[in-house]
Amino acid sequence: MSTTWLPCGQYHQSYAEDHSWWQTRFIKGKMILLFVILFVVIPLFADSYGLSICNQIGYTILGALGVQLLIGYCGQITLGHAAFLAVGAYTSTLLVLEFPWPAVLVHWGLAYPISIIAAAFVAGVWSVLFGLPSARVKGFYLILTTMAAQFITVDFILTQYVSQIGGRGQAFSLPPGTIRVGPWVIDSDLKVYFMMIVLVILAVAVLANLLRSKVGRAWVAIRDNDISAEVMGINVVKYKLLAFFVAGFIGGIAGAFWISNLAAISPEHFPWFWSLWLVGVILIGGVGSIHGTIFGSIFMVVVIEALQLAILPLADIYPKLLMDFLFIKEGTFGLAICAFMIFEPNGLAYRWWQMKNYFNLWPFSY
């Protein structure tokens, strides 16, 4: 019997086969093709503008993964996730610029990689602090708590105090050559792209494996019915706080990565709208799906870039369009969410799932 096609005739005979990532030769071939596209085709043929779009997509994926975990898999609504990205970005920046690193670590280019790990842990712990109310409240009240995280962290602590360190005012300048990973100075869009791809793959792999474990099953049980989960012996508070830590941890990685794409960092890079944007990404991509996080990120970034390119030819006739592009962008964002909630409430991931099933079940796809 052929082992190429799974649904029409092949049956798993062990637990390992049932839970393997790439279950058939066809799927393995698709993944090899994907890796070739990511690591060969795009670096060879994409120009600086194309790479910058890819980096923006990667940053959005890293930021939205934590939101997907909290909302899609644990049922904890958050509207302040940009705060944890900001904590990661500022922690990494301060460690790179201000911490007295041993000369050997600087020479080997380990200061920035270590700062990413430290930033992830700091953001994770900071996320847990604002996740503590989830032990007693949920729904609307938890939304207000996470919104408070945004305003307290970015608008108060970072803007009024952290940004003043060293007398810099509001922005930390990142001189060329500051961001290094080993012998490589991250000073081009291509190098940022390769770092982004590695971080996204690691983050997706870790989160996917967590969701397949006892921890992931506990999160889903809490999402579906936290009272039943507690009756079954799940420590609801423990797993909720763990979800906030992991979400903040990934958010800290996203923030620490993003400083490699900036010449200077300031609180304006982490507005509250970015928190809403990340929630919109998972709503459009599909709640409760890692695929949805990726599809939603690609969709939103590409749509906004296409909109900007469409407006540019009209700028000579209507110059105000460029000045008002931020409002046009926000309006498009809102319309996209409304359209998906009405016509495709399950998101792009559901459509992808239907396409895969149609293909895999052919010729019996009816």
Image: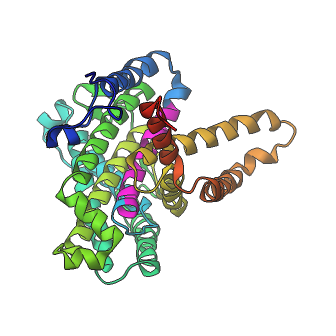
Who is closer to the viewer here, 57 or 95? 57
In-image side of 143 versus 253 (left or right) = right
Residue 117 among magenta residues:
no
Is there any visible trace of residue 212 in the rendered image?
A: yes
x, y percent for residue 13: 16, 37
Magenta residues, start to end: 52-72
x, y percent for residue 312: 75, 35
Of all residues, the one furthest to the top in this rendering is 44
Corner quadrant of residue 205:
top left
* On screen, residue 48 above or below 240: above
Who is closer to the viewer here, 313 or 67? 67
x, y percent for residue 235: 18, 74
x, y percent for residue 238: 20, 72
Q: How many marks?
A: 0
Is there any visible trace of residue 167 in the rendered image?
A: no
In-image side of 326 versus 230 (left or right) = right
